[in-house]
Amino acid sequence: MKIRPARAGDVEGMLRIKRELKLDPTGDAPGGGFLLGATREQYEFLVANAQVLALADDEGALGGFAIALPDAVLRATDVWARRRSIAWGDGGWDALEGARVAYFDQLAVLPGPRHRTYAPALALAALERLVANGHQHLFATVVREPVANLASPPLLHAIGAARVGSIEEEYPEVGRVLSDVYHLVLHPGTAAELATGSP
């Protein structure tokens, strides 16, 4: 398995992974394991314009992917337009207006240990690229309702991210979704600290 920048030809594999990680709205998701949103057209746009990494085997078959929205892409999205609807005290958003901000949109790997063991490396590779490109802040959202993603919060806490608020969204697949919003301050040594386990 290797991690590489995603290509246009990977979109079909990304959609296949999304189908395999279908949300079960009847209970919590202790292992993560679901993706919301993102159509073929959206994935094509993200591969062309955002930071998308692919986890591929020697034959090129996709086993996972990570999507991060760099500053310029993020600021053109609905996520950025709704940033002030997140209840975050201490004037946090005002301090970010002039900073380089990124959003970790999706981390997905096929079920099973063969692919799951690569999820941290895939996330770290995405983070390294954001830091290398001068990003100073990273945000991520984690679904809490109607189904709680229980896998992501411990990973986010382990890298030093803090919950700063929550946001409500609507998705055609499930209706109303409540997500917690996490924030991580990035600096040039962030990726190295995380790789050695000392955030």
Image (cartoon, rainbow, N blue to C red):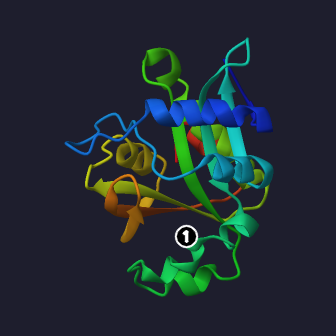
| 79 horizontally vs 74: left or right | left
Near mark 1 (Cα within 10 A), the count class, few <14, some 14-19 or many ≥20, is some
Residue sitting nearer the eye, 22 or 143: 22
| 127 horizontally vs 182: left or right | right
Determine whether the residue tagged by mark 1 lies in a helix, strand or loop.
helix
Return the x and y of residue 9 as percentages of the image width and height. Answer: 77, 32
| 107 horizontally vs 186: left or right | left
Q: Quadrant of residue 177?
A: bottom left
The amino acid on which the numbered mark 1 sits, given as a three-letter code, is Val
Q: Residue at x 57, y 42 (%)?
A: 194
Return the x and y of residue 98 as percentages of the image width and height. Answer: 71, 81
Return the x and y of residue 6 as percentages of the image width and height. Answer: 75, 37
Determine which residue is flagged by label 1: 79
44 to 59, vertically: above or below: below
Q: Residue at x 67, y 65 (%)?
A: 136
118 to 128, vertically: above or below: above
Residue farthest to the top? 58
Residue farthest to the left? 26
Residue sitting nearer the eye, 191 or 130: 130
Q: Quadrant of residue 171?
A: bottom left
Q: Residue at x 29, y 40 (%)?
A: 24
Q: Is residue 189 among what the camera can see?
A: no
Q: Is residue 86 among what the camera can see?
A: yes
Q: Residue at x 33, y 46 (%)?
A: 149
123 to 185, vertically: above or below: above
Return the x and y of residue 13 as percentages of the image width and height. Answer: 63, 29
Residue sitting nearer the eye, 99 or 160: 99
